[in-house]
Amino acid sequence: MPSINRILYLLKTRGDQTAQVLASELGMTAMGARQHLLAAEQDGLVESFMEKRSVGRPARVWRLTEAGHGRFPERHADLTLTLIDSVRSLFGDEGLDALIGHREQQMGNHYLRALAGEPSLEAKVHKLAELRSSEGYMAEVEEAPGGWLLIENHCPICAAAQHCQQFCRSELALFGQCLDGATVSRSEHLLSEGRRCVYLIQAP
């Protein structure tokens, strides 16, 4: 089971992969990786498809199923949706906007305190990724032309964001506020058929 969990984690954070690539990442044989993948397939957690390559034969590539993504649960999804509906019903869209704005302000204050001691924008981006990971976003940072990519491989509030996309718009503003007014744009979006959320962060 630990090996299967590691494979699911890699498919979640790295996207679709061949058994050979997974084997290399995990330090096992390709046959061993395939055995774990077949077991996970029987449990409905992964599925495979043939991908054409520019050279050579098509390769079998593995990806998470909906059940596989479900192994990385959202936080209190049912309760959150109920609360959103209740706020909207009692106070209307203006009340819901006020609630999300209050959440944004609270998170902004928390992030600003945590980032205050970081010496550079780059250090702050890495620290922000740590904070987001602690909240369940499975975040990491990669360098990009003119800045950095903040990559969030999981969204622990995805159900709430699908129900109320003001949460997503709020996060863009929140990141810019906490990162010294940096320019923040979303280059990949989980709710727009992306497999994750990716933010390009550039110095102002």
Image (cartoon, rainbow, N blue to C red):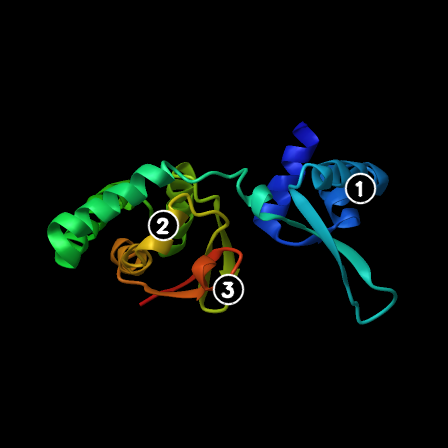
The residue type indicated by label 3 comes to Ala
Q: Is residue 39 left or right of residue 124?
A: right
Query: Which residue is painted at 27% across and 55% down in the image?
Result: 174
In this orientation, does residue 106 appear? yes
Q: Nearer the viewer, residue 22 or 75?
A: 75
The answer for how far apart the CA atoms under marks 3 and 2 are is 16 Å
Horizontal side of residue 139 vs 83, given as left or right: right
Q: Residue at x 44, y 59 (%)?
A: 191
Q: Mark 2 sits on what residue?
A: 124
Question: Which sits earlier in the primary sequence, circle 3 or circle 2?
Answer: 2
The percent position of residue 164, horizontal first and vertical second, equals: 30, 55
> Which amino acid does the dot numbered 2 rest on?
Lys
* Residue that appears at 26% across and 62% down: 181
Q: Earlier in the sequence, mark 1 or mark 2?
A: 1
Callout 1: SS: helix
> Around disc 3, counting alpha carbons within 10 Å, would you say few (fewer than 14), some (14 to 19), or many (20 or more)?
few
Please report contact status of discs 3 and 2: CB closer than 8 Å, yes or no.
no
- When asked about the image quadrant of residue 199, the answer is bottom left
Residue beneath label 1, please? 34
Residue 144 numbered mark, or none: 3
